[in-house]
Image (cartoon, rainbow, N blue to C red):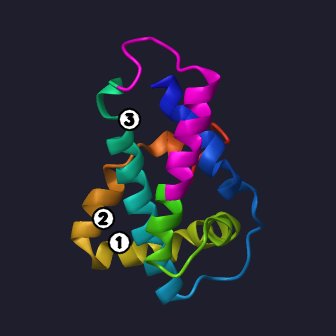
Amino acid sequence: MNLLRQVMGVVLGAALFSGVGLAAEPAEVEKFVKARIEIGEMMMNYFQGGERFGEGQRPSPEQMKAMGEDISAKLGALLSKYGLTVEEYRQRSKEIFADDTAVKGFLDAHPDLKQRYEALPLDRMGRGGSTGRGY
């Protein structure tokens, strides 16, 4: 699980460093919430069971680099469905998710997405934790 936290923090941690702006537009909220759900599910599936390197075994630096590249490629492909780049997502996500009223309103109107969103690991999604990491 530490590996999951480290990779998620490295690949997606910059999302917490962008500035907070004005209220988010509903279409932007929808796009970013859906993207965050898919990113979270992708990351959970990527590390499911910890089978990649064995129980408690730390990957080599080469394996970590390969994993980072693989995750970045998958993240780029996923975000392109929403017309976003990884950099755009990182820059705007904190602003979008800072508008708690808009995010909650969107999720309340879409119970299926709300259920998926709430199933994501809170401490690594930039909501509910104070780790300084997330996406």
Residue 107: mark in rendering: 1
Report the residue marked by disc 3: 47
> Disc 2 marks which amino acid?
Lys
The mark that comes first in sequence, 1 or 3, is 3
Which mark lies nearer to you, 1 or 3?
3
Residue contact between numbered discs 1 and 2, judged by CB atoms under 8 Å: yes
Q: Which residues are magenta?
A: 52-73
Residue farthest to the left, as pictured: 112
Element class at badge 3: loop
In the image, residue 24 lies at what x, y percent? 59, 82
What kind of residue is marked 3? Answer: Phe
The tag on residue 43 is none
| Residue 93 seen in the current view | yes
Q: Is residue 2 above or below residue 75?
A: above
Image point (77%, 67%), residue name: 19
60 in magenta: yes
At label 1, the amino acid type is: Leu
- Horizontal side, residue 106 vs residue 98: left or right: left
Residue 94 falls in image quadrant: bottom right
- Asked if residue 51 is among those painted magenta in the image, a careful observer would answer no
Rate crowding at label 2 as few (under 14), some (14 to 19) or many (20 or more) other CA atoms within 10 Å: some
Label 1: few (<14), some (14–19) or many (≥20) C-alpha neighbours in 10 Å: many
Q: Which residue is mark 2?
A: 114
Q: Position of residue 125 (x, y in %)?
A: 51, 49
Q: Residue, x 62% and y 41% (percent of image)? A: 9
State the quadrant of the N terminus.
top left
**Residue 6 picture quarter:** top right
Of the image marks 1 and 2, the number of the one nearer the N terminus: 1
Give above or below for 113 relative to 4.
Answer: below
